[in-house]
Amino acid sequence: MSEPLKTPVMRHSPSTGKGSPDVWGIYEPDTGSIQYICADPATRQAALIDVVWNFDHKNYRLSTESMDQVLDIVRDEGLSVVWVLDTHPHADHVMASAHLKERTGAPNAIGALVPEIARIWAELYNLPDAFDPVRDFDHLFQEGEIFRIGELEAKVMLSPGHTLGSITYVCGDAAFVHDTLMQPDAGTSRSDFPGGKTTELWDSIQSILALPGNTRLYTGHDYGTQERKEPMWEATVDEHKANNIHVKDGIKREDYIERRQKRDATLALPNRILAALQINLRGGRLPPAENDGNHYLKLPVNRFE
């Protein structure tokens, strides 16, 4: 892996005019995750999207350098956080939602179908009473719901496939499309986790690509390619339709589904998934401390091929 993919990278994508947000993307190298700040240029109110609580999966230690970096940008840019948002319960990183809610005072939110995801994983962990997204998130967004970031209007799109309850946030000419699309030279995201479906991922991507052609699409991850060693996370709808190697214009639904499923069958579970989901389905909170004052995670054995 080249050096740029090993280091944090921050880029600012400025507002393009009335109704368009300022967007900061902050690349987190350990998981290839992109964290976002979406801000109204007029009021300086902002939403934080998919921010990472760093988790060292080798030593099982958590640290806050990524969320600290995001909050440093908030401070330096004179922004006021009004929402802490996640697009889905992440499998490859631990969400910073609960910490950011505490540090900013802003409500945290995720999609309305996350309780269904929680039920799947409660069975896999044999933790029937562990997860309660209604308790751990201030708001569960419905499909088509409208909310505001300052003077900007934001809309929620249900975008299942990677998970059954993933959502996209569309704010003006910016859409935060999480684990659906990758960059055009990398294609799309996987759809083989419990509750995921390749057919639904295709349909979700087609809905995203039906947005206006100049819509800036911000992806959830980037791992580079053999040819490209610099992390990237922004491309327009038109650029994806012209160049995305999995879903560009002319590619048939059945061909995509076959290709995606064949690729997914070769992929191992992400390093952090079994730890991350136990925390993320609690809104970014650790399980309650036990009688020794420490927190413990439960790992299922022989539940996955």
Image (cartoon, grey):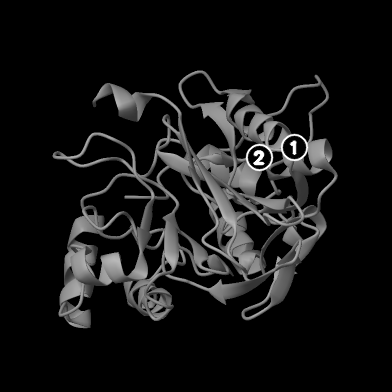
Residue at 50% across / 69% down in the picture? 164
- Give amino acid for label 2: Ala
Please state the horizontal and vertical placement of residue 136, each as a whole percent of the image: 78, 53
Please state the horizontal and vertical placement of residue 182, each as a whole percent of the image: 33, 55
- Please identify the quarter of the rendering in which residue 185 is found: bottom left
Residue 273 can be seen in this image: no
Please state the horizontal and vertical placement of residue 8, each as a whole percent of the image: 45, 28
Q: Whole-Å distance between the Cαs marked 2 and 1? A: 5 Å
77 in relation to 153, above or below: above
In the displayed structure image, the side of residue 259 where residue 8 appears, left or right: right
Residue at 31% across / 40% down in the picture? 223
Under circle 2, the secondary element is loop
Cβ atoms at labels 2 and 1 below 8 Å apart: yes
Residue 115 can be seen in this image: yes
- Please identify the quarter of the rendering in which residue 2 is found: top left
Residue to which mark 2 is pinned: 96
Residue to which mark 1 is pinned: 99
Under circle 1, the secondary element is helix
Q: Quadrant of the N terminus?
A: top left
